[in-house]
Every structure is written in structure tokens, then in C-alpha cells.
Image (cartoon, coloured by chain):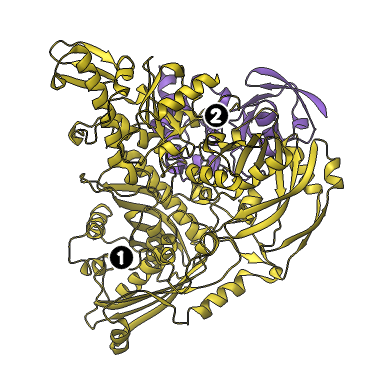
Amino acid sequence: MAKYTLSINGQKVQVEAEPDTPMLWVIRDYVGLKGTKFGCGMALCGACTIHLDGQPIRACQTPISSIKKKNKITTIEGISANIDHVVQRAWIEEQVPQCGYCQSGQIMSAVALLKAIPNPTDADIDTYMSGNLCRCGTYNRIRKAIHTAAAALQTESNK
Amino acid sequence: MSNNQKSNIQRRDFLKFTGLSATAFILGIPSVKADEPALISNLSNLEDAFNLNPYVLIERSGKITLFNTKPEMGQGTYQSIPAIIAEELELSPGQYTVQQTGGEKRFGPLQFSGGSYSVRGSYHDLRKVGAAAREMLLTAAARQWNVPESECYAQDAKIFHHPSGKSLGYGDLVETASKLDAPQNPRLKDPADFKMLGKSVQRADIPLKISGRAVFGIDVEVPGMVYASVERCPVFGAALKGFDKKMALKVAGVEQVLEVVREYGTYKSTGVAVVAKNYWAALKGRKALKVEWDFKGNEKFNSTDYAQSLRELAKTEGLVDHTSGDFDKVYAETNQKLEALYETPFVSHSPLEAMNCTAHWKDEKTLEVWTSTQVPGDVMETLRGRFGLKEENVTVHTCFNGGGFGRRLALDFILEAVDLAKTIKKPVKVLWTREDDTQQGPFRPLTFSALKGALSSDGKLLALQHKVISPTVSAFLEPERDKSKPDGTMTEGISSQAYEIPNMKNLFVLADVHIPLGYWRSVTSSTLAFAHECFIDELAHQAGKDPLQFRMDMLTKDSDTKRVLQKLREVSGWDKPLPPGRGRGIAQWDFFAGLAGHVVEVSKTSDNAVKIDKVYAVIDLGTVVNPDNVKAQVEGGIVMGITAAIKNGITFANGQTEQSNFHDNPIMRMSEMPQIEVHILAEGGDKIKGVGEPGLPPVAAALANAVFAATGKRIRKLPFDPEAL
């Protein structure tokens, strides 16, 4: 067991864990933030997507020992306090989720996509989002919601 | 919460549950903390709460809770079911909260999500539930004001007196109302006045699901709980010979290693559970286990040989499931005929939330479980019976299901956790890995269809025979079933298509298998529709007719199927020829859950490859509760159906599942999506059909028929690779 200081959603958290413990289980079961989901354990489905200094990573393949003190981790709980992030608003507008289990990961990928490419094409969305699986088949709505969010960002930046 | 409060609510729950038909409902978001009872955890002050019937609870403060008996697994029952009550009770979406029921007797026998039954099976009764509660509140107000009821009306959780304009909130009226008898035939609203039903109302679960707030089974935590991962034999039908737990116990955090039995109907297998302080330790402990199995010859099983045995069985006569006219005679006497064998594989459900259950024995006679299940009623009943417990001593918390698709109709993963918790005398969360989920079943049965058809000289279908050859789900879940009779589940829908075929004979050949099998979204229709509707397409081409017109020619009488096909013709632009290199295919399927049809368009990307461009869908409902949600369900059914046609396929070698995770058991991705356009036939009235499943069965057939139209290649076996035809 080793002691780690993590910065998660802007808060400092002390965790004692085995160094090889994936961040997925650290976040869920040590820190208690359940929005980050376990789907495959092999970085194949994207349900555990979180941001490390703004970049999307798969928490199931990221051991706690690889996290540095200065790293800033963001989970689905950290993207907005009131479910009003532009991507979340678009997700509501397009009524994207069905079972909802993959949607934390989808949203974390979409937030990162829009940061990298504020006005993505369908091809950009295909490239960026194809690592996030959805068994309910909400992909077309996700695509639409990303365009909706991009349009909202555009409007905001023009103000 | 004090015991006193608890007993009050229980007593009151039973006060007024009179008269209404017993199709009851509850669903809620259980608390993550075990010390807050889930069913009533969101209710503020129970001393001041009154039930007007099992599904409507109103507190004096005005807070209103509607109970939902249909677990939410993505299909939208968290919105659609309470909305039916709320519409008649004159509530707007923000004026009530929803609680999920946990199999309590007072909520009736239909506490499950399955068979696309939730809305269609409760729509009419739940309108009465809401209307009766509204009338009770209205009567209470009229009496209090001493005015005629006819001068009062309900709106936005209040009763108004029309002449004076005065009003009272439901909270002010509920105590008086709860003392009234529930009206047996309350007046229902005119659908023209509906504010929510028939409208695309936003779902209340969506904000929870995009912010990490929704509680799925996997998210539950109980104080003092431990975690377990179970090593189960990869070979089906094997026995545990022994295990060495020494290395596993050396892993930091591992507490115990012990046997636990998984039961799925008649399928039983003993596994080895590693119990640890955290899940990662349990996984590491599991990897450190040394387990010895007795494969008992089952290691020789492989799906290649098994499929061949079904091809042999296809040559046997089989049991007659349906006969009309004289197929044998007409087929023998007709010159123009066609025969084909269609094959579909075993497939996995693969909901993204792997199976899990948290179980806590508070003492030897008091049990609490938290799980993602489609069948809380069955869970409650089974746990009570299995352990001889009183209903009040079993609490089932029905969490949001991270996908169901039929997998969560099974109790295997629940019983395993409950048994383990009983042995170790600690609350425990048993969580399956993706590999466990992919490899252990139950799977959709591999299903073959042998078809024969005879055409008249002018291209009319005179005779059709569809013989289904398959192992059955009932072999595991209903072992007492008479095997000398055809299994209706395995032949569902094939005899009841609306096509007017003068001579039909449908048969069933039972195949044995020891691999656990389960109901998969749209059950056998997901395979039979592929075979049946592709073969109809083959016959159309043989007859030299347009595949849609060939079908219409068999639908001289008015029928829902006919209207679906007419609508598809219109919305897909069927009669407008596609440019060279593109093709479209059509299929429909009418079965227990409902009716839908699709036109799929593909384009050739090379000589032996196609791209799926677009799916036009028409679903026949009659009455629709939430059109946008219906569209979402049809979209989802299409994606799952295409996935099963071109991706999935569970195979076995050396007695074991060959696939293990999403790399070798893939599902469709964003980049592979066709456009989807959904149309709903909803003329209103009493007719109401299912939503969750009907969008699935026809899609594989429509796709394969489109491939034929574009390339001339006939697909008779799933899965197929559209990029390597």
C-alpha cells in the first residue's frame, strides 16, 4: 500500500492503495465517485473515460502510481455542478441516453473532442468517438448532440 | 427512520388498495447508502403521507410520489409508466418523483420489464389508477367546500372550484381523499386533452444519467461490505475438482476464498469466489488461484460440429407447429419451387453494465439486495421461497439497469451473491468481469431455419414451409416442458404473419445443448424473421416480382402489416429506382411484442463489399405514449439487430466460449452507423403495441435483402461481413 494525493474535480484527495490499482477503482470505490463506469477493463469500450489534464484517458488502464501530484483529474461529476455544461445541455436536448451506462464516458470524450475541434465534422466525430461503445445504439443521437453543442459554443463565442 | 414511521407507512399502504385492477407499478432511485431504506428513502415525512392506491403516494406537504413497477433499462419506463398515471392525475413532469418498486406484493404480479410489455400491458389500467386518484381528491375538495363535484376540476396538482376560482393542493386534500373508496370506473380524460401522453416529453432519468447521478446496481455501497469475483469453469458442464487458495490469500486485501454455486434454471456450476476488501484485490486474488476442473468430456464440444449436427437434424421431419391447407400435396405437385437453409449463431447480450448484485443478510432472517434486474417481482418471490423468508424481511432495491436485453431476466448472478453473503456473513458485492459476461452465457440460441416454397406459374406463393431447428431456452428454465410438443417460443410469429398463403406447414426440431441459453431482445423473432423474410425475398425474385409488391400481393385483406408496408413504400421512396451500385431491401415482422418493418439501403464499395447507408423504419403502435422515446427504441433495436447480423457470434471450441471481450465480440461503433429514419403509425384508440423489441427482428432480413439487390449475393448465414461478401 502506498499513499497518494490526487486532484480530482478541483479537490485534493488522499488515497491509500496498491500502486497497480487502476484509477477506475480508485475513483469509484476509494473516492466514491460512481459516475465513471466499468465496462470492459481493457480500454475497449470507453465507459471509464476521464480527463487527465484535459486529455481523455481510460481509467481502467491507468494505474494510480502513474498519476503525478500535479495532474488534474476530471470525472463526469466535475464537468459542471448543475448539469449545465454545453455538452450536457445538448445531451438533454437530443434525449441521447437510453440505459445511460456508457454516457459518462461518451460525454467525457465529447467534451474533449469539442475542446480539440470546436466545430467537428462527421468524420471528426467518427474518429474521436469510435472508442466509446453504446450497446443501446444511441450513436446517431450522440452525433447530433455533438453538433448541437458545437453550434451552441459557436453562438456563445460570437456574443 | 424509526420503526414507528415504518409501520405507519406500511399500514397506510394497505388502507386503500381497493378495486383497481392489480397491474401495479413502482420504480425509484435507491439510495447508495444501505442505512437509508431504498423504497421510502426519498419520501420526506412519512407521518404525513397517504396512499390513494399502491401507485400514488401524496404527502401533506404536497410532495407526490408515483411508483413504477417496470425497471428502467434504457427503454424509458421511468418516464412513460408514471406519465400514464400523472396524465390522468393532472400532474406535470416536475410535480412528482418516481420510485421503483422492489417486488412488494402490494404492487402486484407484473413487476418486470420484458416482452415489450410495460406500456402496452399497463396503459389502460394505469390511466384508471390516475383517474381514480384524481376523482378521490376532487370529491374530497367538493365535500370540504360543500359544492357540487361538477363545479370542480383538477389541474397542476390542485383541485379548483370553477365558479369561485378557489383551489386546494393535493397535499391539503389527501388525508380526506384517502378515506374514500376508490371509484371503480373513473372518468378517463379525452385523449385530445392529453398534455403528456402522445407527446415527446423529456425523460427525467436523462439528467441523472449525464451527470453520474443515476445509481446502477454496480454503484451501490453498503457499510462494511466486501467485494467478490468468481472464477467459473470456462468449460460448460464441468465440475470443480479442487483449488489451491494459498497464493490468492497472499494478495493484499483478499479475505477469503470459497466455493459458490451459480444456478441458472437447470444449469448449475460451482465456482470459486475470491472475497476481498476491494474489487481490484479480488481480481488479483482470482488470477492467483489454482483451480482444477473435471471437464467430464464437455471439453470436446465445439460449435462447428454442433452446427453440423443441426444441419443433419434439419433433414428430420420435426414436430408440426402449425398447418393450414395442404403443404405436402401442393409442394409435391408444383413445378416452381425453392428450398433454403438459413443459419444464425449463438449471441451474447453484452449489456455494458456487467452482471452484479450486492447482498446483505442483516440477520439470519432479514435480507436486503441491490441489483440491476428486469424482474424485481421474480427476485422477491424467489428469495422468499429459497430461504423461507417473510416478505417484510426481504428488501429488493431495483436499480437503474445498465442495459438488459433479456440478460437481466435471469437471477443467476443475484442468487450467487445472496448465497455468498449468507456464507461469509458480510454484505458483499459480486461483480462479473466483461470476460465472465461474454463467456458464461446465457446466450441466444443458435437457430437454423429450413424453408421450402412453391410458386404458381404466375408467380404467386402457393405453399410455404418453415422448419425451425434449435436448442431451446426452455430446456433450462422449464425442464418439465413436454418435448413431444413444439416449443412455441422457438417458432414464435412464423405462422401468424399476415401473408395470405393458402398452404402452410411449420415445424420444429429440438436440438439438445448443455450451454445455458436465454431470452435475447425480441427472443426467437430476432432469428426467425431473418430466415423467413429473406426467403420471401428469394421467392419474390424467383417469381420475377418486386419484393415489396410480392408481399403486397399476399395482403389482399386490410391488416396492420399491409399498412406498415404501404407506409414503408411511401417513406423510403421504394418505387423510385436507385442508381447502379446501390440496393434496397425490405422486411417486416409481426410477433408477440408488436410489428415493425424496415427498408435498408446499401451501396457497393467494391465487388464484394457494401456500406449500409440508411434504414427507414415503420413501427405500428396504435396508441403512442412518447414518440421520441419510441424512435429511440427503434433506433436501438436496429443497431442491435445489425450488430447481431454483421458482428456478433459466440462460438465454442474445446468446450469453451472463444470470445472474451469487445475486441473479439465487437458491437457496432459510431463510425459504422447508417442514417436511421423512424416513422410511427399511431392512429390512437384502444390498440397499443410494444416498443422495445419490434424494431429489431426485420432489420437483418432487410439488410441481407438489400445486399442481394445491390450485389446479387444471397446471405443465408449470420453473421456476415458486409466488407467481405
Q: Quadrant of the N terminus of chain B?
A: top right
Task: Tell which tag, 1 or 2, sits nearer the viewer.
Answer: 1
Q: Residues within 10 Å of mark 1 (few under 14, many from 20)?
A: few
- Label 1 marks which chain's residue? B
Q: Position of residue B541 (x, y in %)?
A: 31, 74
Question: Is residue B34 placed above or below B472 in the rendered structure?
Answer: above
Q: Position of residue B486 (x, y in %)?
A: 43, 71
- Identify the chain drawn in yellow: B
Q: Position of residue B580 (x, y in %)?
A: 34, 64
Is residue B151 visible in the rendered image? The answer is: yes
Classify residue B398 as left or right of residue B34.
left
Kindly state the secondary structure of the residue where label 2 is placed: loop
- Identify the chain drawn in purple: A
Question: Is residue B717 placed above or below B282 in the rendered structure?
Answer: below
Q: Residues within 10 Å of mark 2 (few under 14, many from 20)?
A: many
Specify the amino acid type for callout 1.
Ser
Classify residue B189 as left or right of residue B486.
left
Residue found 70% across the figure and 24% down from its top: A71
Q: Which mark is residue B212?
A: 2
Q: Nearer the viewer, residue B96 or B705?
A: B96
Tag 1 residue: B496
Query: What separation in Å lies between label 1 and label 2 (alpha carbons)?
Result: 44 Å
Classify residue B304 as left or right of residue B642.
right
Q: Position of residue B100 (x, y in %)?
A: 46, 34
Q: Nearer the viewer, residue B503 or B223?
A: B223
The answer to which quarter of the image holds residue B282 is top right
